Amino acid sequence: MIGKLAKVTIRTIREKKEKGEKIVALTAYDYPTAKILDTVGVDIILVGDSVGNVVLGYESTLPVTMEEMLHHTRAVKRAVKNALLVGDMPFLSYQTSIEEAVKNAGLFIKAGAEAVKIEGGRQFVPLIEKLTQSGIPVMGHIGLTPQWIHSFGGHRIQGRTAKDALVLLEDAILLEKAGAFSIVLEGIPLQVAKLITETLSIPTIGIGAGVHCDGQILVFHDLFGLGDFIPKHAKVVADLKTIIADGVKKYIEEVKQGIFPALENSFSMSDEEVEALRKEWSKRRS
């Protein structure tokens, strides 16, 4: 049984790296899922813009709006008591201007997030500096950044050459200097992730970046086999898609056969009241 959990903060996350303790992060987009994750001890809950793919049915994260992200952030916040809650800034919510980005990041904080996540490297150093100066903690995100898939030509692993890996390392260093409290490393070779992790004093959170990161994050739906496909970097710990489908099939069968609802699923009235009802109804029909 898990005992009382301590509230995870930005300081907690930094201390975990110093102590060599792995950081565990997952995405959540609704109250019941977030409640489970928070209760069992997940360190970081990210309301990811992956909500577009796995919940809203979009083909990518690009169509996701601020309104949609704030809606899901508020729902998750109602469940979270222990984990550090991070809101994922969607496409074009921070790329147009620093002023607009600070405003949108502030809306995440007002919705209950304790930090925001931004995709991209050195080009966002001024923004990260401004956000941190404004009291808004920032989680960086470099490597295979889904909001940049058109620039990458698809979901391609980044940093496979020494030249490209050095760019990622330099970006990570710049994001740390700008004030990011942690950085997500997505879709990069494990050797590159190891070098970045050893170089930085802030934690790295990997997704498809190998074992050497300070922590790991996965999309909840990938972890439980609920997505349309399972990426190579993910691991299915329980096939909920099959479990749910089998359960629904059983429900369909029992309803059609008259097995459900049974007496224990039904409400009743006394025999006297039933008789009184029948008599009164008979009078009204005559």
Image: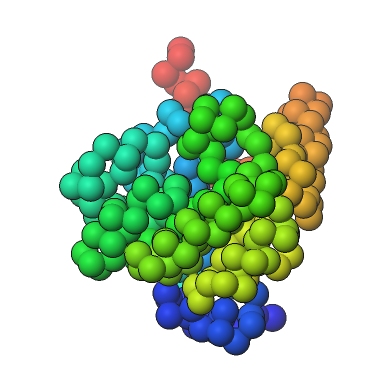
Residue at left 48%, top 37%? Answer: 147
Please indicate, yes or no, whether residue 124 appears anywhere in the rendered image: yes
Whether 135 is drawn above or below 52: the answer is: below
Please indicate, yes or no, whether residue 39 appears anywhere in the rendered image: no
Colouring scheme, one of rainbow, by chain, secondary structure, one colour: rainbow
Q: Quadrant of residue 248?
A: top right
Q: Position of residue 261 (x, y in %)?
A: 70, 38
Q: Position of residue 26 (x, y in %)?
A: 59, 58
Q: Quadrant of residue 43?
A: bottom right
Question: Most extreme residue toward the top, as rendered?
Answer: 286
Residue at left 68%, top 47%? Answer: 161
Residue closer to the observer: 272 or 236: 236
Residue closer to the observer: 142 or 235: 142
Quadrant of the frame with the N terminus: bottom right
Residue at left 55%, top 59%? Answer: 169
Residue at left 38%, top 68%? Answer: 177
Question: Most extreme residue toward the front, as rendered?
Answer: 163
Whether 232 is drawn above or below 65: the answer is: below
Q: Position of residue 193 (x, y in %)?
A: 65, 61
Position of 222 with respect to 63 (left or right) is: right
Question: Most extreme residue toward the left, as rendered?
Answer: 99
Q: How many marks?
A: 0
Residue closer to the observer: 220 or 30: 220
Q: Position of residue 143 (x, y in %)?
A: 57, 48
